[in-house]
Image (cartoon, helix red, strand yellow):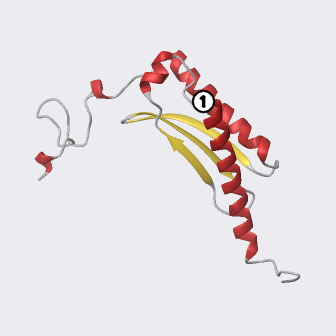
Amino acid sequence: MNGNTPYAGLPGETGAGQRAAADVPDLSRTQKRSLHRDVSRIAARTRDFLPDEYVVDSEVSQSMTGPQVTVAVRPPIGHAVSAGFTPDLEEVAAGDAVISADERDEVARGLAASAALQVKQAISDNVTPTAK
């Protein structure tokens, strides 16, 4: 059944489970800088919403399908939260901001709210309410 999938490979060209090198987009330095700049802006905006105890980090990595962008928040207690996406390569190639200012603010607010909720959920089991 492996021969029915697009990942079966081409005999003599591409091994099973591998993609052809031409299928994987390669970014220039300028494009990588643009992605790093935009994702750093999201991380900085997220830090603005949260106290210093929260750790916010961002990453641009390369996968088999192209660049992947991730922003993650580690709250002082509770589970980490993250937001990630695959940018449109045509927008990156154009040199424009890959993520608009409104989208950056929306993602930053969402991450900050999710991280705060993680803290609330983590401590809600350990705190006895003073009144109802």
Residue under the point 51% across and 20% down: 31
Residue 111 location in percent, x, y? 65, 49
Residue occupying the point 42% across, 22% down = 90
* Rendered residue at 66%/56% (across/down): 114
Residue 66 shown left or right of residue 108 in the figure: left
Q: Quadrant of the C terminus?
A: bottom right
Q: Is residue 31 above or below residue 118?
A: above
**x, y (%) of residue 23?**
29, 28
Furthest residue to the front?
102
Q: Secondary structure at mark 1?
A: loop
Picture quadrant where residue 59 is located: top right
From the viewer's perspective, is 91 left or right of 82?
Answer: left
Quadrant hosting residue 78: bottom right
Q: Position of residue 58 (x, y in %)?
A: 62, 38
Q: Residue furthest right?
A: 130
Q: How many badges with numbers are in the image?
A: 1
Name the residue that disc number 1 marks: 100
Q: Is residue 8 left or right of residue 89?
A: left
Give 8 or 43, whichever is nearer the viewer. Answer: 43
- Amino acid on which disc 1 is placed: Ser
Number of residues whose C-alpha sits closer than 10 Å to that of mark 1, classed few (under 14), some (14–19) or many (20 or more): few
Horizontally, is 38 left or right of 68 in the view?
right
Q: Position of residue 42 (x, y in %)?
A: 66, 36
Q: Is residue 8 above or below residue 35?
A: below
Which residue: 72% across, 47% down?
55
